[in-house]
Amino acid sequence: MRATIALMLGGLMLSGCNNSCQMLCVRIAKVAEADCGIPVPDDDIATCIDRQAGAASRDDRSTCRSANSLDDIRAEWSCEDMAYFLGVVRADQADEAN
């Protein structure tokens, strides 16, 4: 997954058609996996990026820009927040639903 995240981040940077919320998808996926043990499939990262394309308001993009580092994400986002933003269900939540 690390290679995929690097490729997606590089692709976004080269495409010229990215916004701060799309970049946040990749950063949050990295933190969610490393710190929370949340596996984030490549398809979920791509879906998050697509969902954030052009749909984010100016205020949303400003909020996304404020989380411009992995440390900012760690300080401001809970594991539940990251899972929700990425559209993934954590394993412990899936168990509770059953």
Image (cartoon, grey):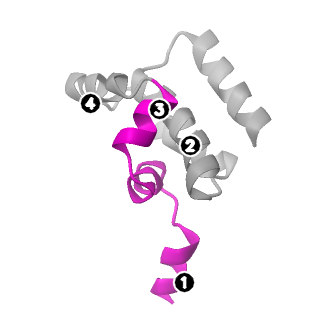
Q: Tell which circle, 1 or 4, labels the residue nearer the N-terminal end.
A: 4
Q: Helix, strand, or loop for circle 3? A: helix
Q: From the viewer's side, name the closer residue of 9 and 77.
A: 77
* Measured Cα–Cα span from mark 1 to mark 3: 29 Å
The residue shown at (54%, 9%) is 16
Dominant SS type (magenta): helix
Q: Is residue 78 magenta?
A: yes
Magenta part of the protein: which range? 69-98
Q: How many angstroms separate mark 2 from mark 1 (CA)?
A: 22 Å
Q: CA distance from mark 2 to mark 3?
A: 9 Å
x and y, in percent, of residue 43 in the image: 65, 48
Neighbour tally class for label 4: few under 14, some 14-19, many 20 plus, Cα within 10 Å: some
Residue 87, relative to residue 69: is it above or below? below
Q: Which residue is mark 1?
A: 95
Q: Residue at x 45, y 56 (%)?
A: 79
* Upstream in sequence: badge 2 or badge 4: 2
**Left or right of residue 84, residue 70 in this image:** right
Q: In this rendering, which labeled residue sits more in front, label 2 or label 1?
A: 2
Residue named by callout 2: 31
**Disc 1 element:** helix
Is 32 contained in the magenta span? no
Amino acid at dot 3? Asp
Q: Which residue is mark 3?
A: 71
Which of disc 3 and disc 2 is earlier in sequence? Answer: 2
Provide the secondary structure element on which disc 4 rests. Answer: helix
Question: Callout 4, which amino acid?
Answer: Asp
Given residues 43 and 59, the one toward you in this image is 59
SS class, disc 2: helix
From the image, tell me which residue sits under label 4.
Answer: 60
Q: Is residue 65 left or right of residue 4?
A: left
Whether tag 2 and tag 4 are in contact, CB under 8 A, the answer is no
